[in-house]
Image (cartoon, grey):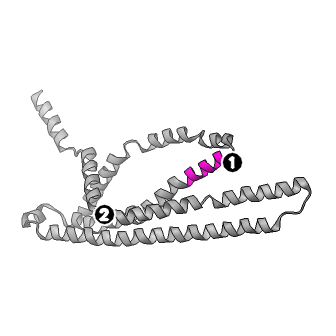
Amino acid sequence: MSDSVTSKTTAAQATPDYVSEREEGRQALKELLKPVQGSLMIGRILAGLSGVLAIAPYIALVQLGGLFATAYATGQPVAADRAMLIVQILISTFCLRIFLLFIALGVTHFADARFVSYVRARTIERVGNAPLGWFTSTNSGRIRKALHDDVAQIHTMVAHQPVEMTQAMIMPVALLVYAFYVDWRLGLLSIATIPLYGLFMAWMMSGMGPKTVEMDAKLARVSAT
């Protein structure tokens, strides 16, 4: 009985705590990102403005539809000047949106370049000062993964995620606000499926954090092997 308890205790101690490891990794990453947080915030702001401008085509369609409907109902010709003004505003806002998105991605990509240089410099400094015994117990494959693979994967998180996630959040919100502006019933219809979507996403993503850490640890084992 005691041998069974001892073996279970030993197995529990040998099993990595991926939840704690994930939290420690998040804190470490937050600390590392401090030098580029300002640039990432600028990228998010520009992406948010670009996301708001993304609803311009929908507004233009509504305005043009109203213009054509009025002309059809009254039997009068379409007001060409007003239609041309709406089209010009549409083209201008589209170009401004693309420009802001380009600048936002440029800011975050430059931030990513600085971040990668900073992380690699700190890692090399840490490895350079490590005792020789550490290299005996640490496989070179793990070091290569940390210096190359992990840093390469961070590119998406730093250079793209702030812009793309901000747009993915701002655009639906802006469209929802405009839907309420057009007709409150249309707005209510727009948010009717949001609770179902939230529950479905929560179910799909449950336990994803620890599983991601576990996958990363096993990839490190593969790299070391």
Indicate the position of residue 39 as horizontal and vertical percent values.
37, 66
Quarter holding residue 141: bottom left
What span is in magenta? 171-182
Q: Of 140 and 152, which appears nearest the observer?
A: 152
Q: CA distance from mark 1 to mark 2?
A: 47 Å
Question: Mark 2 falls on what kind of element?
Answer: helix
Q: Is residue 102 magenta?
A: no
Q: Amino acid at mark 2?
A: Asp
Q: Is residue 180 magenta?
A: yes
Question: Residue 182, labelled with which disc?
Answer: 1
Indicate the position of residue 196 as horizontal and vertical percent values.
54, 38
Side of 73 relative to 62 (left or right): right
Determine the residue positioned at 51% across, 67% down: 101
Residue 180 against residue 120 in the figure, above or below: above
Q: In the rendered structure, which disc, 1 or 2, sits on the residue that comes first in sequence?
A: 2
Determine the residue positioned at 27% across, 63% down: 223
Residue denoted by label 2: 150
Q: Of 194 and 221, which appears nearest the observer?
A: 194
Determine the residue positioned at 41% across, 66% down: 159
The reply to whether residue 60 is in sight is yes
Indicate the position of residue 114 as horizontal and vertical percent values.
32, 72
Q: Amino acid at mark 1?
A: Val
User: From the image, which quarter does the C terminus lie in?
Assistant: bottom left
Quarter holding residue 110: bottom left
Determine the residue positioned at 29% across, 69% down: 148
